[in-house]
């Protein structure tokens, strides 16, 4: 009999393993080589996403804002509480392997037909232990482990998104500051132009229409200055929400207008704005890594796979519900109640029971639960595949945007230089009477538009780098 029982248990284990109860989840490794898209070269080197965020964002002001957000942002704190909740669930699943103990003392006083009252007591210590022969506890623990890992991935996803959000908001402020500086500088130039055209009109070299059109353009620039100031306040309020504090003004590097008539443009790059310097502060040499690295780097991809793993063990648990549950229970303690007799002092009482519960009339319900678990597993598998494809698409979009903005920055820089020279020449020609005010008006408007476009493109270049960093799973310590 002693030899037969182990052999029987081994055979049962092999049988149950073939039924999928004891199978182990295997992590996904099948990632398309062209996940980033055709024409994108991926190298098996350290990815940009593995770079610590302080090495990627080197601006001290931005670093202070990010650290404040990580300490106070409510979404990130909520994600931390979610991790603690998952840790408690995992601990509960692990403790399910241990027997449960309970102390249940009882006492009673009874009397029959006014006879002398009798007192009885019982002080038992009860224990119950479920044998996990069919994997129900094991699968529940594995599922809890996957959900705990998923909560950590969710926390990292919130962290990555928060860091990128603070950085985008900060650089948006720098862009608006620079556009405001350009507009204020242009406003002053327009004011001087209005004064000049009035002087020409008084000298009989211009008419009232020229003055009116110059004034109209001047008022339009003044209006755009007010709009930019309003946008700056709105973005500062958005930053305050990320930092979980009331709206206020945030100190940042002072923007300067580059490439205007008030600040002559230097083709050798001597005059560089804060935003231009920020665009050049990001790492010059970096790699996007091979596609399979996304499985380990991107928190949303890891989270989707953890969900698939949890659904996998949920299916195993649904299968194990078809098999019996075996529970060992017992109690030991002192009592003075021995049936119809009362003994004093009390005596030791011990008992042990083994029970087996096999579902008989619940096959339909259990079959339905198994079908639900399988459907959830299939849905989690599709969600994981789609998340992986979305990740590859985001990397491709960020790479394209980064390259496009870099190429445009060279062209826009040349355009601003050319239009600035054109404005100076046209202004001189108008003052000497060889051209009209309309040409000056057009030249000044074209220059302002080009300057604002150049600033917007610098921000687009910065934003594409932030997006690429986030798409590769950046945001590590």
Image: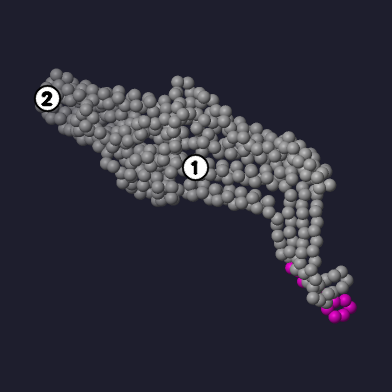
Q: Is residue 102 magenta?
A: no
| Residue 115 lies in the magenta stretch | yes
Q: Mark 2 falls on what kind of element? A: loop
Query: From the image, which quarter does the C terminus lie in?
Result: top left
Residue 186 seen by the camera: no
- In the displayed structure, does residue 88 sit left or right of residue 34? right
Picture coordinates of residue 414 (x, y %)?
26, 23
Magenta stretch, main secondary structure class = loop
Secondary structure at badge 1 equals helix
Q: How far across and how far down the image is residue 394, in percent? A: 47, 30
Q: Mark 2 sits on what residue?
A: 204
Q: Position of residue 318 (x, y in %)?
A: 72, 40
What residue is drawn where x is 14% and y is 24%?
428
> Magenta stretch?
105-117
Residue farthest top in this picture: 434
Q: Which residue is mark 1?
A: 156
On screen, residue 126 versus residue 187, left or right, reads right
Mark 1 crowd level (few <14, some 14–19, many ≥20, 10 Å Cα): many
């Amino acid at each position: 009999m002693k030899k037969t029982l182990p052999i029987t248990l081994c055979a049962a284990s092999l049988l149950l393993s073939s039924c999928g109860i004891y199978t182990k989840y295997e992590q996904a490794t099948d990632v398309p080589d062209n996940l980033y898209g055709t024409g994108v070269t991926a190298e098996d080197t350290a990815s940009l996403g593995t770079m610590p965020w302080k090495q990627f964002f080197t601006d001290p002001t931005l670093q202070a804002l990010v650290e404040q957000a990580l300490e106070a942002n409510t979404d990130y704190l909520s994600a931390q509480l979610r991790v603690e909740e998952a840790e408690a669930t995992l601990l509960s699943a692990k403790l399910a392997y241990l027997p449960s103990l309970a102390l249940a003392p009882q006492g009673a006083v009874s009397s029959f037909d006014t006879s002398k009252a009798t007192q009885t007591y019982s002080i038992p210590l009860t224990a119950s232990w479920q044998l996990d022969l069919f994997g129900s506890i094991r699968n529940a623990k594995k599922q809890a482990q996957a959900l705990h890992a998923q909560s950590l991935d969710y926390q990292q996803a919130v962290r990555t998104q928060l860091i990128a959000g603070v950085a985008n908001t900060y650089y948006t402020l720098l862009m608006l500051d620079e556009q405001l500086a350009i507009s204020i500088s242009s406003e002053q130039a327009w004011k001087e132009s209005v004064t000049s055209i009035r002087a020409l009109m008084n000298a009989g070299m211009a008419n009232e229409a020229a003055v009116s059109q110059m004034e109209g353009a001047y008022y339009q620039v003044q209006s755009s200055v007010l709009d930019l100031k309003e946008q700056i306040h709105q973005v500062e309020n958005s930053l305050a929400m990320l930092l979980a504090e009331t709206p206020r003004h945030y100190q940042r590097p002072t923007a300067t207008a580059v490439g205007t008539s008030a600040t002559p443009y230097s083709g050798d790059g001597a005059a560089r704005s804060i935003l231009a310097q920020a665009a050049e502060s990001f790492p010059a040499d970096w790699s996007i890594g091979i596609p399979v690295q996304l499985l380990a780097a991107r928190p949303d991809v890891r989270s989707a796979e953890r969900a698939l793993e949890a659904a996998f063990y949920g299916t195993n648990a649904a299968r194990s519900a078809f098999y019996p549950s075996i529970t060992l229970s017992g109690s030991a303690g002192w009592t003075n109640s021995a049936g119809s007799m009362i003994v004093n002092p009390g005596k030791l009482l011990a008992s042990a029971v083994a029970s087996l519960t096999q579902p008989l009339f619940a096959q339909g319900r259990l079959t339905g639960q198994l079908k639900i678990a399988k459907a959830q597993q299939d849905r989690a598998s599709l969600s994981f595949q789609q998340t992986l494809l979305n990740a590859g698409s985001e990397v491709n979009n960020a790479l394209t945007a980064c390259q496009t903005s870099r190429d445009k920055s060279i062209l826009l820089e040349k355009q601003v230089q050319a239009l600035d020279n054109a404005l100076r020449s046209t202004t001189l020609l108008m003052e000497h009477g060889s051209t009209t005010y309309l040409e000056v008006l057009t030249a000044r408007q074209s220059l302002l538009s080009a300057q604002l476009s150049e600033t917007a493109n610098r921000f687009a270049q910065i934003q594409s780098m932030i997006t690429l960093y986030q798409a590769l799973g950046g945001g590590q310590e």
